[in-house]
């Protein structure tokens, strides 16, 4: 049985970086692959003597035509041939995509009178693919090195045989909800350490901030109830075959309360027998 990774995403969201990363990890990578050719590649990989056990296929298009009508049947055919198939979608906010295109002076592959219009058109076209993806990674606030590290972290754990990979992320609502979150939790009901002058310059990784948050009875109740909820939910996700789960915890700025609770919730997840990845998206803003 071969392993296939189908990489799709918004133009400018990091598909080229992903291709380079997986090539470095030892995958056989084919970039800018027309979806109609996916099954042909599977036939070549399946030939006896082929050494390409892990294949990453970066799907793309010429111009702005729709290709989901070709992609979905091709992915289904790969699965029907008893291959292991994962679909990765790379996304990014409109602001980040505009900044990247304007910074590189590249022409967006979708038609539009402006970069914003082209991005909006592509997002409409790509929504069915994004919604069906096994894993969505938001690259809005990641540089190429951070995206590479994120992908390595995710897929090296996958190679180690982790059934359900769980990421616990802190963020600030004022910077936008993470695009790749499966579950969003709002902890702005807790007192904000930002208004304590001696805590303002610290983060949730510092002891005084953690103590300030965790002394609140509501914080302890929150974690206790999340423990019960995740104890129920995680086996259900595993039973349904879900491979990735991103839990996003938000406060106002993403530097204090959400950081503390993300660290604490990661401990809860660990206690349930999993090894979560923790990411603090806005801690340095």
Image (cartoon, helix red, strand yellow):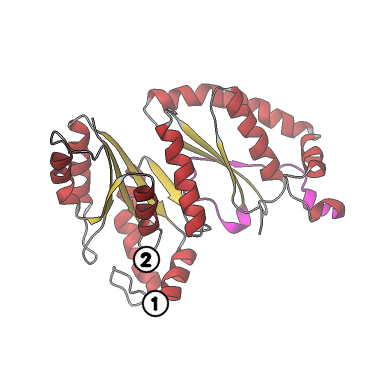
> In the drawing, does residue 98 fall left or right of residue 7?
right
Instruction: Say few, some or many: other residues with alpha carbon within 10 Å of mark 1 (under 14 / 14 to 19 / 20 or more).
Output: few
- Image quarter where the N terminus lies is top left
For marks 1 and 2, give the CA distance.
Answer: 15 Å
Please identify the residue farthest to the right as the structure is shown. Answer: 198
**Which residue occupies 67% across, 54% down?**
253
Q: Residue at x 14, y 42 (%)?
A: 44
Instruction: Identify the residue shown where x is 80% and y is 54%.
Output: 200
Q: Which residue is mark 1?
A: 105
Residue 133 visible somewhere in the drawing: yes
Number of the label disc, if any, that sits on residue 119: 2
Taking depth in this image into account, of 116 and 86 the one nearest to the observer is: 86
Residue bounds of the magenta highlight: 173-197
Q: Position of residue 239 (x, y in %)?
A: 39, 22
Q: Is residue 195 covered in magenta?
A: yes
Residue 92 placement (x, y as % from top left): 45, 58
**In the image, residue 119 above or below residue 221:** below
Please say if the residues under marks 1 and 2 sit with CB atoms less than 8 Å apart.
no
Above or below, comparing residue 202 to residue 157 in the picture: below
Q: Residues within 10 Å of mark 2 (few under 14, many from 20)?
A: many
Q: Which one is in front, 55 or 227?
A: 55
* Image quadrant assignment for residue 249: top right
Query: Dot 2: what SS?
Result: helix
Q: In the depicted view, which residue is nearer to us: 15 or 129?
A: 15
Task: Look at 42% across and 34% down and name the residue there.
Answer: 158
Q: Earlier in the sequence, mark 1 or mark 2?
A: 1
Q: Which structural element holds mark 1? A: loop
Quarter-of-image position of residue 204: top right
Q: Which mark is residue 44?
A: none
């Amino acid at each position: 049985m071969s392993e296939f990774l189908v990489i799709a995403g918004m133009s400018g969201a990091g598909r080229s970086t992903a291709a380079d990363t997986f090539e470095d990890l030892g995958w056989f990578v084919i970039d800018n692959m027309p979806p109609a050719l996916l099954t042909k590649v599977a036939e070549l990989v399946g030939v006896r003597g082929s050494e390409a056990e892990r294949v990453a296929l970066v799907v793309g298009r010429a111009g702005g035509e729709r290709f989901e009508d070709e992609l979905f049947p091709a992915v289904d055919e790969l699965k029907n041939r008893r291959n292991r198939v994962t679909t990765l979608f790379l996304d990014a906010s409109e602001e980040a995509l505009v900044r990247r295109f304007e910074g590189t002076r590249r022409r967006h592959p979708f038609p539009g009178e402006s970069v914003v219009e082209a991005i909006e058109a592509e997002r409409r076209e790509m929504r069915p693919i994004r919604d069906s993806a096994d894993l969505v990674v938001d690259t809005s606030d990641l540089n190429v090195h951070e995206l590479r590290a994120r992908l390595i972290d995710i897929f090296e754990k996958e190679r180690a045989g982790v059934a359900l990979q769980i990421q616990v992320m802190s963020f600030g609502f004022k910077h936008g909800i993470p695009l790749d979150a499966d579950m969003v939790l709002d902890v702005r009901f807790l007192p904000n350490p930002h208004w304590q002058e001696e805590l303002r310059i610290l983060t949730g990784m510092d002891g005084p901030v953690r103590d300030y948050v965790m002394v609140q009875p509501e914080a302890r109740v929150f974690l206790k109830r999340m423990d019960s909820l995740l104890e129920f939910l995680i086996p259900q996700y595993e039973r349904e075959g879900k491979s990735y789960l991103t839990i996003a915890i938000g406060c106002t700025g993403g530097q204090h309360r959400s950081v503390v609770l993300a660290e604490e919730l990661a401990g809860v997840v660990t206690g349930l027998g999993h090894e979560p990845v923790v990411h603090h998206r806005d801690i340095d803003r």
